[in-house]
Image (cartoon, rainbow, N blue to C red):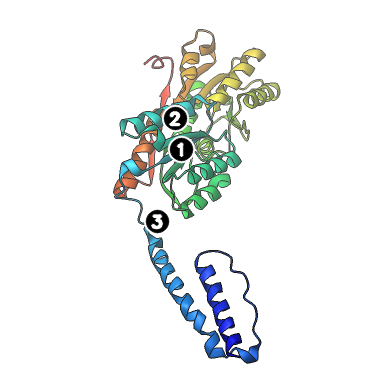
Amino acid sequence: MVKKLLATILSAMMAVSLAACGGAAAPAPAAPAAEAPAAEEAAPAEEAKPAAEEAAPAEEAAPAAEESAGGADLSSLKFGFVVGSFEHTFYQLIQQGIEAECEAKGLNSDQYTVLDASLDPVIATQKVETLTADGCNAIALACNDAAGVKPAIENADADGVKMFTFDCTSESDAINCFVGTDNVEGGRLGGQELLRLTGDGDTVAIIGYPTASSCKDREDGCLEVLEGKDRKVLTGYDYKGDANEAQKIMENILTTNPEVKAVFTVGDPAATGALAAIKAAGSDCLIIGFDGNPEAKEAILSPENGKYWVSEISQNPKEIGSRIVDEMIQFMTEGTVTDKKIFIAPYIITEENAAE
């Protein structure tokens, strides 16, 4: 009887020892209930208690992730960036601003990474996950599809990554700072240009991109200015960030409304597509673009294309890129940002100032 009891106790002690090492313990041979008194069976549980006590400090350390912003050594930090699309000049310029500012602040090439989301929320989500897995302490992205990337932002935040946005943002409490153009004001400037370039009773159009919050703001700002004015407004289009799609939309507009006098496009790729359609149709419709990319300025100054593309609402993508870097560094090292939302004012480019 005593031998059986000793065997039972030794088996239980071996099982506890294996569990404490993180291995999967093999089940101990079951002893008959009558020969294993409850008081003696409880003894191994006392030996497992220290393992639970050792785990306690890990639970106490959990709040450290919340306190990681501020006071960090810059040399120990990694930053990740996800731009809308490397195919768009605007995002290429933002990338240039990001990289120039990272270098100016003394970050080495291992401390920052810039990735491309191809204007796709699924790809953007994958890039955020990649940067999180790579150990980035802070990530900034352009939310071209605000709803589509919101889960990725909040999942990264839950993993302790500090989240930022630029160009277009998402309504998530996880975002510490947004830097971008005042897009509503930019849209208002576009609306003012439509009024300046046309007369009462004229037909005007807006080629939009409602999925991107920044572009929706531009269209909303333009419509605000046109409200109550004597213009027939053609709206409700989605060029999806694709110049070819914008060309098809413009072709359709010119077919159904050949009298259209001017079109406001919420991005330069849309203006490029509209230009091709207008020239092919032999129309004299005028174009107001939005971005301020080099091709827009070249078109405005061109003797041929400048007859159509006459105005541009300009952003400052390099400043957006450099400013988001500054805010991320400030937040991670000092624990603060200049403001939750930082807007860079847009301005109008015409033939008079395009060369400046």
Q: Amino acid at mark 1?
A: Phe
- Mark 3 Cα within 10 Å, few/some/many (few <14, many 20+)? few
Residue 305 in view, yes or no: yes
Measured along the vertical axis of the image, is residue 171 above or below residue 97? Answer: below
The residue beneath circle 1 is 81
Mark 3 or mark 1: whose residue is earlier in sequence: 3
Return the x and y of residue 249 as percentages of the image width and height: 66, 26
Return the x and y of residue 42 as percentages of the image width and height: 52, 85
Return the x and y of residue 78 as percentages of the image width and height: 40, 41
The answer to whether the residue labelled 2 contacts the one labelled 1, judged by CB atoms less than 8 Å apart, is yes
Q: Secondary structure at mark 2?
A: helix
- Image quadrant of residue 61? bottom left
Can you tell which of label 3 and label 1 is closer to the viewer? 3
Label 3 to label 1, Cα distance in Å? Answer: 21 Å
Q: Give the label on residue 65, or none.
A: 3
Q: Amino acid at mark 3?
A: Ala
- The residue at 48%/29% (across/down) is 91
Measured along the vertical axis of the image, is residue 347 above or below residue 37? Answer: above
Mark 2 or mark 1: whose residue is earlier in sequence: 1
The residue beneath circle 2 is 95
